[in-house]
Image (spheres, rainbow, N blue to C red):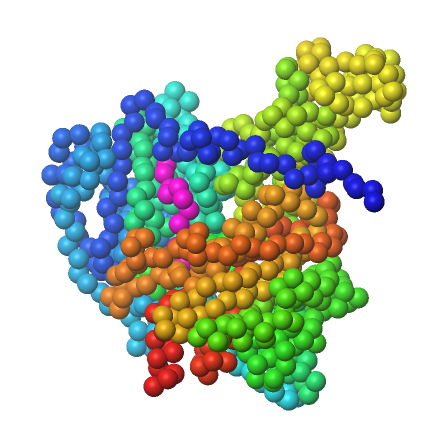
């Protein structure tokens, strides 16, 4: 049997990450590793109450303390504008919703525990903290609104009294008439209410920043971990500081995880810049872990009610969903856009013409909510797949067969859903079947009996998903040929650990006949990289790599044209290999070093491949687990994932992304929960109280693909960075519910299914 050789580079090659040697040997270079001569240090005074009028005293005393250089309060920020919300939605009534004014520092009212009040700059962090302790905040308590459902009560305290309600916005979409007709004709209706618990992203590297100002040029420099500096530069300059974007350079060194949270502009960034200009020296701020819990945008936090209408054959004919989305105390940068994107995916992989979905945003006295890995799409998949599993149980149909009855067929693609999404390619039944075979679905009953004999409850759960990602647009890539024969790639995506240098580099290396270490990638510098859309929404590889490949091909063409003149042969007779341009079939050649050295200017190529529509990765997750009824502890025994990512660029990088996303979702399903008490105090503000899954809590994943190339992407790629986080939570919870329904008659348990929650539910069920 002939075997196809594994490619060394190029699309599909399993190239090991070139970045990892530096990271695992302690050579990573993060914001806090940067020492700037003459830098002073900043800390932030944050509110200890969730809602209050405030008055400050002791500020002058603090300013006079040893080592203190500057204290900024709201009174010192005249001319500094509010922090904007960039996602303002059109509501069902045709209006744009109201947007509250969010100050960089609170002037007279704080609205959540952690809201910023003052910015203290001193020679050392200890001196800054000492000065912070001298500032006295007189709090005049106000009533609080906690919990998105409770906040909608007519008697609830208003986070924004001038708005008159805690309702932030009300949006909806779909075919309401068809939905109502489907429910009118329904043979069976299933209803469910689920909570999608609030999460804190907890990247391994907390945020940090360094602000600098150069008097001679009049330019600022901000160094910080981001998911793309160009958008942050524009927001800070245009919306907050009111200066020209050319007067701010944003530099991003290595970034220890982003997950959406580091996409946003936080108040410390403009404050460090303002302070640097006023002091004439660099200002550095470093976040503590508890500050991350108290101040950085959090994720999820939805309460959803859904109903599914079935015809006499068990086919889905109507879907009605209402999502209540907690926005926190302010509308964060893209906060309203998260439920807005999410509801477009609510019908999943099913042919449900009668679909209607609404979402209501709600203000509460909590940390604002914004994008977290998946950004609305995990929330949509969760409510749908929990609902679908419950409907299968109520009608006595195997959950896999129940799904198959309503899958969009491959022959129906491209298919536009009632929510306006156009799925281009996929084989939904195929990846479900493959996952069932891999997990050994046919033999589950035997394994279940073995667990029961051992006093354990065994459950199996599945979830199929589809995601819209790599949204329409493009990402410019520029390649430069260097004097030493290497090339430099400049691109405005931003790696936070994904492996961009490897993924881009393996394509460039293949095209130009180079080794991977001869391809340098430059990201994270708005002066060096002309433009950039950053990293988010699984866009970097689908959009970035198409432009990287196009720029590589353009540079190869330019190199061959120059070489053809020097070698006096036709362009078609040339190939690039081992740093040389060779005449095919001969030993006649010229090196890239010689070509670069012969030119008066550096040879370069820039391309930006545009994409008109999203990509739609999809797949099946199946989880098999055991629950110990004596302790409530859940152990995952098998976990199978079969995904359709169109084209696999690097199978090793892909597996890492899927494992990471699934791990985060399993952590949400079984462990993580952000808890506020009735006064708005954050009770889970450290790792003592906020449980993130450890390595021994996670299973060994059985991951494979059933790829069907995308027609919306030039290379056939479907984004993969968030997919694992979308399918895993419903698969795990469906497995939990299988075990608890069958063995204890329990109908509903919400995430996280912690041991104490499961044990308590079992005790209650048993009287």
Q: Position of residue 665 (x, y in %)?
A: 49, 59
Residue in the image at 84% along x and 18% along y = 583
Q: Position of residue 174 (x, y in %)?
A: 62, 71
- Foreground residue among 162 and 250: 250
User: Where 642 falls versus 278 (above or below)?
Assistant: below
Left of 132 or right of it: where is 383? Answer: right
The segment highlighted magenta reads: 199-209
Is residue 207 found inside the magenta-colored segment of the image?
yes
Residue in the image at 65% along x and 71% along y = 442
- Foreground residue among 520 and 610: 520
User: Where 431 falls versus 657 (above or below)?
Assistant: below
Left of 582 or right of it: where is 169? Answer: left
User: Where 373 falls versus 592 (above or below)?
Assistant: below
**Is residue 43 among what the camera can see?**
yes
Residue in the image at 46% along x and 64% along y = 635
Is residue 347 found inside the magenta-colored segment of the image?
no
Q: Position of residue 452 (x, y in %)?
A: 49, 76
Q: Position of residue 499 (x, y in %)?
A: 56, 39
Q: Quadrant of residue 433?
A: bottom right
Count of marks, rendered view:
0
Q: Which quadrant would the N terminus be assigned to in this image?
A: top right
Q: Which quadrant would the C terminus be assigned to in this image?
A: bottom left
């Amino acid at each position: 049997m002939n075997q196809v050789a594994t490619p060394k580079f190029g699309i599909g090659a399993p190239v090991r990450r070139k970045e990892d040697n530096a990271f695992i040997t302690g050579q990573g270079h993060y914001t806090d590793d940067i020492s700037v001569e003459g830098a002073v240090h900043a800390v932030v005074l944050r509110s200890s109450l969730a809602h209050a009028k405030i008055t400050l005293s002791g500020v002058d005393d603090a300013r006079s303390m040893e080592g203190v250089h500057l204290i900024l309060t709201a009174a010192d920020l005249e001319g500094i504008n509010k922090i904007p919300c960039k996602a303002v939605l059109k509501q069902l009534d045709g209006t744009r919703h109201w947007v509250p004014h969010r100050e960089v520092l609170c002037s007279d009212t704080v609205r959540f525990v952690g809201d910023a009040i003052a910015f203290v700059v001193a020679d050392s962090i200890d001196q800054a903290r000492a000065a912070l302790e001298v500032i006295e905040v007189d709090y005049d308590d106000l009533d609080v609104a906690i919990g998105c459902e409770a906040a909608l009560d007519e008697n609830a305290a208003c986070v924004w009294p001038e708005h008159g309600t805690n309702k932030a916005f009300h949006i909806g979409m779909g075919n309401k008439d068809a939905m109502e007709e489907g429910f009118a004709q329904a043979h069976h209706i299933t209803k469910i209410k689920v909570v999608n618990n609030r999460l804190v992203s907890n990247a391994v590297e907390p945020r940090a920043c360094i602000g600098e100002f150069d008097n001679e040029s009049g330019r600022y420099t901000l160094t910080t971990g981001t998911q793309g500096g160009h958008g942050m530069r524009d927001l800070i300059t245009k919306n907050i500081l009111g200066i020209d974007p050319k007067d701010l350079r944003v530099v991003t060194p290595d970034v220890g995880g982003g997950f959406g949270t580091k996409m946003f502009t936080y108040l410390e960034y403009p404050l460090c810049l303002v302070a640097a200009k006023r002091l004439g020296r660099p200002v550095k701020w470093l976040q503590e872990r508890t500050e991350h819990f108290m101040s950085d945008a959090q994720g999820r936090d939805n309460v959803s009610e859904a109903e599914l209408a079935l015809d006499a054959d068990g086919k889905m004919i109507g879907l009605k969903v209402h999502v209540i989305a907690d926005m926190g105390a302010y509308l964060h940068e893209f906060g309203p856009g998260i439920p807005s994107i999410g509801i477009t995916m609510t019908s999943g992989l099913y042919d449900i013409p009668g679909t209607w979905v609404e979402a209501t945003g709600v203000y509460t006295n909590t940390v604002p909510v914004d994008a977290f890995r998946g950004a609305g799409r995990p929330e949509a998949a969760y409510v749908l797949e929990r609902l679908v599993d419950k409907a299968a149980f109520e009608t006595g149909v195997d959950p896999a067969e129940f799904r198959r009855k309503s899958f969009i067929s491959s022959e129906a693609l491209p298919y536009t859903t009632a929510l306006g999404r156009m799925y281009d390619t996929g084989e939904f039944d195929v990846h479900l079947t493959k996952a069932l075979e891999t997990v050994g679905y046919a033999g589950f009953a035997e394994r279940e009996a073995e667990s029961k004999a051992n006093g354990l409850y065994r459950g199996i759960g599945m979830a199929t998903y589809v995601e819209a990602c790599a949204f329409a647009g493009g990402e410019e890539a520029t390649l430069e040929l260097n004097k030493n024969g290497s090339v430099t790639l400049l691109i405005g995506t931003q790696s936070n650990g994904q492996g961009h240098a490897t993924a881009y580099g393996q394509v460039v290396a293949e095209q130009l006949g180079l080794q991977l270490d001869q391809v340098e990638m430059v990201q994270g510098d708005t002066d060096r990289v002309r433009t950039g859309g950053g990293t988010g929404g699984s866009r970097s590889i689908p959009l970035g790599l198409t432009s990287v490949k196009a720029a590589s091909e353009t540079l190869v063409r330019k190199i061959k044209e120059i070489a053809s003149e020097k070698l006096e042969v036709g362009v078609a007779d040339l190939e690039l290999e081992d740093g040389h341009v060779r005449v095919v079939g001969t030993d006649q050649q010229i090196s890239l070093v010689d070509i670069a050295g012969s030119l008066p200017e550096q040879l370069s190529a820039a391309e930006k491949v545009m994409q008109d529509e999203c990509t739609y990765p999809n797949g099946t997750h199946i989880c098999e687990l055991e629950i110990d009824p004596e302790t409530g502890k859940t152990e995952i025994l098998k976990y199978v994932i079969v995904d359709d990512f169109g084209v696999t660029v690097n199978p090793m990088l892909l597996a890492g992304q899927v494992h990471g996303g699934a791990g985060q979702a399993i952590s949400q399903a079984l462990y993580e929960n952000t808890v506020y008490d009735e006064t708005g105090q954050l009770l889970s503000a450290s790792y003592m109280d906020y449980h993130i899954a450890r390595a021994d809590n996670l299973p060994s994943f059985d991951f494979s693909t059933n790829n069907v190339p995308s027609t919306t992407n030039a290379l056939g790629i479907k984004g993969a960075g968030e997919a694992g986080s979308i399918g895993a939570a419903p698969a795990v919870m469906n497995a939990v519910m299988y075990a608890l329904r069958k063995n204890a008659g329990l109908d509903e348990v919400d995430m996280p299914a912690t041991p104490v929650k499961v044990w308590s539910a079992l005790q209650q069920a048993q009287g």
